[in-house]
Image (cartoon, helix red, strand yellow):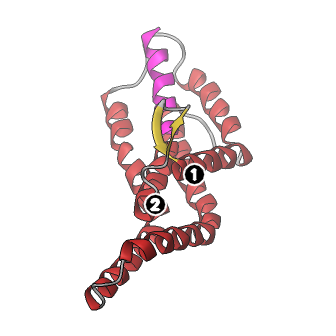
Amino acid sequence: SVQQLAIGVAMGFVVQLVFGAVVIAGQSIAVGMGLGFSEVVDPLNGVQVPVLSQFYSITATLLFLALDGHLLLIQVLAASFHALPVGPLGLDRADLWRLAGWGSQMFAGAITIALPALLSLILVNLAFGMVTKAAPQMNIFAVGFPVTILVGFVLILVTLPALGDQFQSLAGSAFALLSRLFGAGG
């Protein structure tokens, strides 16, 4: 029925928001590094995203599988048939508002993932601004662009281990929401 279709769409929506947070974080970092124009087609969404965003998306997918997220999703799906059996019951208005409100978690998660790298890149750009002011004859684009990219990659290397914890926290809150909505244990 239409209600079961809505339940499945709601589950997919929440999980997609988790991955959307990682994609937005990757896009933000790529733009801060100056790699905003290096885009590839994201096969999941069918849009062009920076290469760095695609890297973060693939990393998040591997983390999702390593953390048994696919098994948790199947568990929530199976539990939804017990909590909301096939029939006229489904999501009520409060549940739909909870789902829509959870969309803000995507942006909060993206900020949490990208903030350390973005703040550092802003500081690098501010330093280049001061150097340009102090030595206007210096070609800051010839020096600044490669340095910004190098600093960006170093920051990615340093912050990549934290991505696992941040993704696990975001996915955990997504599954907690799904468990509350559909009566699943876990």
In the image, what residue occupies the spot 30% across and 83% down?
A: 132
Graded by Cα atoms within 10 Å as few (under 14), some (14 to 19) or many (20 or more), the crowding at tag 1 reads many
* Magenta stretch bounds: 1-17
The amino acid type of the residue labelled 1 equals Tyr
The image shows residue 171, relative to residue 70, as above or below, that is below
- Indicate left or right for 88 with 168 as reference: left
Q: Does label 1 or label 2 sit earlier along the sequence?
A: 2
Q: Nearer the viewer, residue 46 or 71?
A: 46
Q: Secondary structure at mark 2?
A: helix
Magenta stretch encompasses residue 9: yes
Q: In the rendering, at what x and y percent does residue 141 appear?
A: 38, 71
Magenta stretch encompasses residue 123: no
CB atoms at circles 1 and 2 under 8 Å apart? yes
The amino acid type of the residue labelled 2 equals Ile
Q: Is residue 77 visible?
A: yes
Q: In the rendering, at what x and y percent does residue 88 appear?
A: 43, 11
Q: Main secondary structure of the magenta part?
A: helix
The image shows residue 119, relative to residue 171, as above or below, that is below
Which residue in the protein does label 1 denote?
A: 56
Which residue in the protein does label 2 denote?
A: 29
Q: Nearer the viewer, residue 95 or 162?
A: 162
In the image, what residue occupies the spot 50% across and 70% down?
A: 146
Q: In the rendering, at what x and y percent does residue 108 appear?
A: 39, 56
The image shows residue 104, relative to residue 3, as above or below, that is below
